[in-house]
Image (cartoon, grey):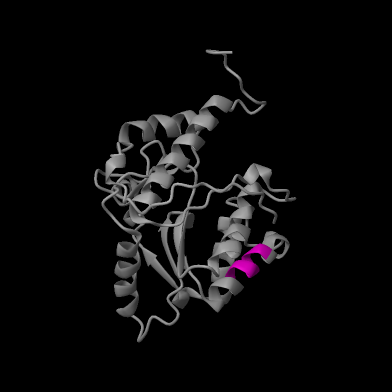
Amino acid sequence: TPGSDITNKKGINFFDNIQLSTLSIENKLLYSHLYGYPFFFYHSKLAKTDRGPTWTKIKVLLKYLTNYDWLIWIDIDAFIINNDITLEYFINSARSLYLKNHDSDENFDIIIGEDWNGINNGVFFIRNSPWSMNFLNEVWNSYYTASSHIKFTLQFHEQSAMQYVLDLHKDNHHVQIVPLNWFNSYSRSVHIEQVELKEKYYYEKGDFIIHCPGVPVFQKLKSILPELPILDLNIIPDHVNWRIQLFDFEI
């Protein structure tokens, strides 16, 4: 009923979750149509798996990566704020950084940012390449082997597994680390103790994305709602097909 507080045993309000998901889908759908990018959304709760639902991220990437040159993954609690920036801008900028230390971009496969915990895969780019496919498969298959490693923790689920596989094989030459605030700026609801890190990680006006990892849903909404852009639908290109296809996803 209107106004009632429907929560689960963990105290999570379902209405807040629905609002966050709806806003996030609309946000990314409008941006993708603005530039003609394909957009795929999946609900991890519908995937049957014996591990945490975020692990299905790896299977989704494996499913679609072979169809495109690059994919960008964006978590549900990460919102595109600056619609003036294209995805190609980040790929080209990262490639320029990569070529400063490499003779060619043949192995230029992942673009990702880091925080005090290591990589953060809430938003990252991955290229269609044999290495990328092998990497994602190894991350998926590392669920049991990585968790048994004495120096490894699955605290951050598939993100920790990605870090583990990269560290295990020292495959950093396939990964271009970029400043986190290029496309994965954190909301100020995310607690950062070190003062010197706040400028590096917190969202500022003009940043591409605001991301709210590790905070309650109501705080995510409080941080995101004031920043959401109002997109003029009249600027959507005439050729855009607004058809939305829904289908089941099996891992």
The residue positioned 66% from the left and 52% from the top of the image is 249
The residue positioned 60% from the left and 56% from the top of the image is 158
- Eyeballing the image, is 14 above or below 81? above
Residue 117, position in %: x, y?
48, 54
Residue 144, position in %: x, y?
73, 61
- What secondary structure is the stretch in magenta mostly built from? helix
Residue sitting nearer the eye, 128 or 246: 246
The residue positioned 35% from the left and 67% from the top of the image is 91
Residue 138 placement, left or right of 19: right
The residue positioned 44% from the left and 47% from the top of the image is 242
Residue 30, position in %: x, y?
38, 45
Residue sitting nearer the eye, 163 or 197: 163
Residue 134 placement, left or right of 93: right
Residue sitting nearer the eye, 70 or 50: 70
- Eyeballing the image, is 92 above or below 187? below
Residue sitting nearer the eye, 109 or 63: 63
Q: Does the magenta stretch include residue 18?
A: no
Q: Does the magenta stretch include residue 136?
A: yes
Q: Can residue 154 be seen in this view?
A: no
Residue 130, position in %: x, y?
56, 78
Name which quarter of the figure residue 96 lies in: bottom left
Residue 78 placement, left or right of 66: left
Tell me the quadrant of the picture where the C terminus can be found. bottom right
User: What's drawn in magenta, residue-wise?
Assistant: 135-140
